[in-house]
């Protein structure tokens, strides 16, 4: 079986609007599952350079799918091996929630595999 890895990754600055008000981090952190393909999330890694907790939210079609809290000046690695299939046309995005007024940088790396 042939598979193709895909990655949503980079270093991004943010300005918090509230932990309960996540917003898309950047257009580069959006992925649409191609027609005729099934995709699975394999892992999430993240780092937070801010002095406050932030939460990266993995969304599916605009609705929260998984939450990844990252402590102040901390990091996280979460294996997601074969948790669930993402079908053709599904839109995956990474959003960020941070306390209002908090600004900083976040490093994100979401590994996906197309099957």
Image (cartoon, rainbow, N blue to C red):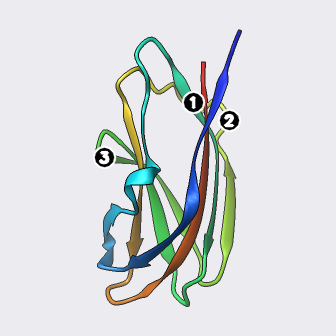
Task: State the separation of the CA atoms marked 3 and 1.
Answer: 17 Å
Callout in the foreground (2, 1)? 1
Distance between mark 3 and mark 2 Cα atoms: 21 Å
Q: Are marks 2 and 1 in contact (CB under 8 Å)?
A: yes
Q: What numbered label is drawn on residue 56? A: none
Q: Secondary structure at mark 1?
A: strand
Which x, y percent locates residue 63? 30, 46
x%, y% of residue 100?
Answer: 32, 86
* Mark 2 vs mark 1, CA separation in Å: 8 Å
Task: Specify few, some or many for label 2: CA neighbours under 10 Å numbering under 14, 14-19, or 20 or more.
Answer: few
Q: Which callout, 3 or 1, points at the residue further toward the start of the chain?
A: 1
Q: Earlier in the sequence, mark 3 or mark 2?
A: 3
Kind of element beneath mark 3 = strand
Q: Quadrant of residue 65?
A: top left
Q: Secondary structure at mark 2?
A: loop
Q: Is residue 79 left or right of residue 48?
A: right
* Residue visible at 51% across and 19% down in the picture: 38
Q: Which residue has dot 3 on it?
A: 63
Q: Which residue is mark 2?
A: 81
Residue of label 1: 40
């Amino acid at each position: 079986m042939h598979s193709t890895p895909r990655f949503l990754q980079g270093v991004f600055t943010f300005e918090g609007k509230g932990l309960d008000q996540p917003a898309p981090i950047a257009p580069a952190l959006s992925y649409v599952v191609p027609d005729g393909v099934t995709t699975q999330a394999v892992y999430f890694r993240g780092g937070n350079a801010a002095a406050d907790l932030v939460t990266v939210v993995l969304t599916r079609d605009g609705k929260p799918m998984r939450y990844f809290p990252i402590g102040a000046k901390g990091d996280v690695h979460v294996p997601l091996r074969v948790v669930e299939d993402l079908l053709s046309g599904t839109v995956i995005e990474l959003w960020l929630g941070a306390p209002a007024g908090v600004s900083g940088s976040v490093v994100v790396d979401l590994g996906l595999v197309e099957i």
